[in-house]
Image (spheres, rainbow, N blue to C red):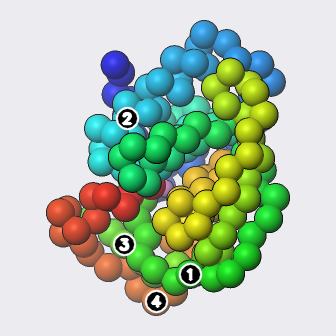
Amino acid sequence: MAIRNIRLMGDPILEKTCKEVKEMTPRTRELIDDMIDTMYDANGVGLAAPQVGVLKRIVVIDVTGEDLIVLVNPRIMETSGEQTGGEGCLSLPGKSGTVTRPNYVKVKAYDRDMQPIEVEGTELLARAICHEVDHLDGHMYVEKVEGELTDVAEEEYEEEYE
Ligand code: NI
């Protein structure tokens, strides 16, 4: 188990576009394992590779604590509906903001064995997928926040950080 350092907003690596994973290597497997450990350690519901300083198109998500999803090279194929709600990010601890996202998302990706997978999500899962895929293109949720960012007490946000 290895916890990696989470990069904070302002770090230029969070503004870069990540590269596709061409093949699964032991090093990339280790990255994925570390991302999972780091996400759970930080009580996050999602984490993208650039948040641990690696410019690869990989995200890990678990919105319930029991449904781990690893997405390699995710591509959002379909969205529908709309949801508006609070959102936070492990790269901007202590803050939250209101963001409107699709309420349904279908994503194509590869799993950690580079087998093609398709994942559909609604509500928090749809929000998390959009939030994490944005990270892979150098975008933070703060760009989409409606109104002001607010300070949040740790116990309130810790299950919704991405
Ligand atoms: Ni985030």
Q: Is disc 4 surrounded by few (<14), some (14 to 19) or many (20+) residues within 10 Å?
A: few
| Badge 4 or badge 1: first in the primary sequence | 1
Tell me the mark number nearer the camera, choosing from 3 and 1.
1
Q: Is disc 3 surrounded by few (<14), some (14 to 19) or many (20+) residues within 10 Å?
A: many
| Badge 2 or badge 1: first in the primary sequence | 2
Whether residue 80 is visible, yes or no, is: yes
Q: Is residue 145 above or below residue 47?
A: below
Give the labeled residue for mark 4: 147
Q: Is disc 2 surrounded by few (<14), some (14 to 19) or many (20+) residues within 10 Å?
A: many
> Residue at horizontal 22%, vertical 68%?
156
Image location (x, y in percent) of residue 86: 41, 76
Give the labeled residue for mark 1: 83
Q: Residue 107 got which mark?
A: none
Q: Residue 38 got which mark?
A: 2
| Badge 2 or badge 3: first in the primary sequence | 2
Q: Find the distance from the CA under tag 2 to the CA under tag 4.
A: 30 Å
Foreground pick, 9 / 105: 105
Q: Find the distance from the CA under tag 2 to the CA under tag 3.
A: 20 Å
